[in-house]
Amino acid sequence: MNQQLSSSHYDGLLRCFLENTDIVADYLNNALEEGQESFFLALKDVIDVCGGPALFSQKTGLNRFSVNGMFSGKPTMESTTEVLKALKLKLLDNRVILCETK
């Protein structure tokens, strides 16, 4: 019997997976391998799991317009770096890695 996941079930599974920083890094790296557009769509998924751009901005102190701009076709390296840093991640040699914690 072939069962399909409902949208809400899929969103719940995605939310569980993306609450783990190691999994988020892997998820973003897989998307990055597929290209820039896939990377930003995956990053949007992560931000959506965090409550969406407005709540993510509020929780992290990032500028909401910078976060929203990433998904309206105007991403900058600065805004991408800020979002990744808020997620305790960073880009190094075209890979997303965990930031070292001290």
Image (cartoon, grey):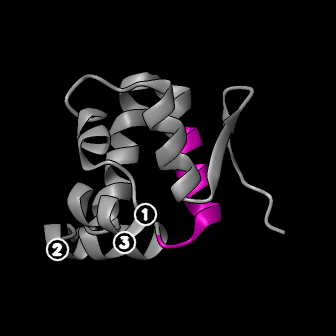
Residue under the image location 26 percent in, 49 percent down: 64
69 left or right of 81?
A: left
Left or right of 22 in this view: 11: left
In this picture, residue 25 sits left or right of residue 92: left
Dot 1 corresponds to which residue?
A: 60
Q: Which residue is mark 2?
A: 8
Residue 1 image offset from top left, x and y in percent: 23, 73
Secondary element under disc 2, as helix, strand or loop, is helix
Q: Nearer the viewer, mark 1 or mark 2?
A: 1
Against 6, residue 42 (above or below) is: above
Task: Please tell me how crowded label 2 is: few (under 14), some (14-19), or many (20+) other residues with Cα within 10 Å.
Answer: few
Residue 55 part of the magenta-drawn span: no
Q: Nearer the viewer, residue 2 or 90?
A: 90
Nearer to me, 51 or 79: 79
The residue stretch that appears in magenta = 19-30
Taking 42 as reference, is 71 left or right?
A: left
Residue type at tag 2: Ser
The disc labelled 1 sits on which kind of residue?
Thr
Q: Nearer the viewer, residue 76 or 25?
A: 76
Q: Real-space Cα distance between discs 3 and 1?
A: 18 Å
Which circle, 2 or 3, is nearer the viewer? 3
Q: Residues within 10 Å of mark 3 (few under 14, many from 20)?
A: some
x then y, percent, for residue 3: 21, 71
- Of residues 23 and 77, the one nearer the viewer is 77
Residue drawn at (46%, 66%), measured in percent from left and top?
A: 18
Quarter holding residue 9: bottom left
Mark 2–mark 3 Cα distance, whole angstroms, equals 10 Å
> Does 10 sit above or below residue 94?
below
Residue tagged 3: 15
- Asked which secondary structure carries label 1, the reply is helix
- Among the two numbered marks 2 and 3 on one chain, the one whose residue lies closer to the N terminus: 2
